Image (cartoon, grey):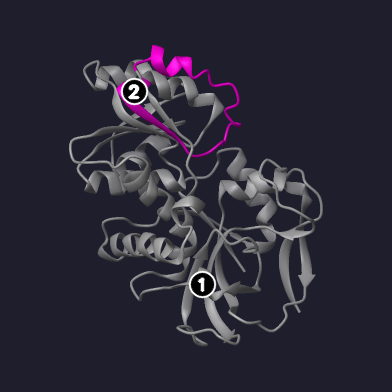
Amino acid sequence: MSRAVRIHQLGGPEVLSWDEVDIPAPGVGQVALRQTAVGLNFIDVYQRSGLYPLGELPQVLGMEAAGVVESVGEGVDGFAPGDRVAYAMVLGAYAEHRLVDAEKLLKLPDSVSDESAAAVLLQGMTARYLLKGSFPVKSGDTILLMAAAGGVGLILSQWARDLGATVIGCVGSEEKAELARRNGCAHTINYREENVAARVHELTDGEGVAVSYDSVGAATLEASLDSLRPTGTLVSFGNASGPITNLNLGLLAQKGSLYVQRPTLATYIRTRELLQACADDLFDVLGSGLVHAHIGQRYRLEQAADAHRDLEARRTTGSTILVP
């Protein structure tokens, strides 16, 4: 018998339930894990609330974790008991023990700890596809980053700085501004006190930025679009303030022949080869020290509801992990 955080109905953090669950022996192609650290991400909130469909309930929440292989099922090659592994974009992570398909698992190098992997694998691979897929950032680019002190924001800003870009980060407090500046942002804008687009144009001599990476959604759509240079790109990759539902495509023409993307990590890791290549890039920059994991908060796994409340209230910085 093991325990996991499940939801039996959609709703607020109060629907998270600390339940006893049965873990069967691994089947064909499966690996049994003892989990050591679990990541917290906004997708967990979207699934809990019903914004992203989950299917039949009850369901164990959570999309990433790290742990140790306990046993393997028939047909599994490349993994053995005792291996340190991690995964992302696999539902069911809020658990002490679980089964995972071997094709979704990644072996952890010695240079990456379990906690770092659980804290940054999903967010770090997100940063990687944003910087190298959605809009390939090159040296000399100036970019805008909403929620710069969040988990993806801190990773992306460090990585972008290493690529030679100038990062302008939007934050909601001076404390978060200091954190963002320590992690790659050349400039910060407090969106509570400043006009974001006006400040961006001051910082870029009126040109605007090449790209705005925006995980906030509805509340920052206008600021992102108005901060772009002609033919600039808005990459909208999250909905922390609510989804964008009423974008008039004619605005893109009026504001300078702009581009808009709404990508997802799942698309960029849709095959085993893409997943491994994305993770290898992330492990390289983590292992070399070019990018480091900022774990701002730790909660016991059974305190997942408290973690959700703090995440939604924007009381968190960097990454958050849940400890089984």
Determine crowd level at label 1: few under 14, some 14-19, many 20+ residues with C-alpha closer than 10 A: some
List x then y, in percent, for residue 28. 62, 82
Above or below residue 30? Residue 43 is above
- Mark 2 — residue? 228
- Residue depicted at x 36% and y 21%: 227
- Residue depicted at x 76% and y 79%: 1
Residue 305 visible somewhere in the drawing = yes
- Residue depicted at x 53% and y 45%: 316
Give the mark nearer the N terminus: 1 vs 2.
Answer: 1
Above or below residue 283? Residue 152 is above
Residue 183 visible somewhere in the drawing = no
Between 318 and 129, the one nearer to me in the picture = 129
- Residue depicted at x 71% and y 52%: 54
Q: What span is in magenta?
A: 227-256
List x then y, in percent, for residue 16. 75, 54
List x then y, in percent, for residue 111. 33, 72
For badge 1, the amino acid type reads: Glu
Above or below residue 320? Residue 234 is above
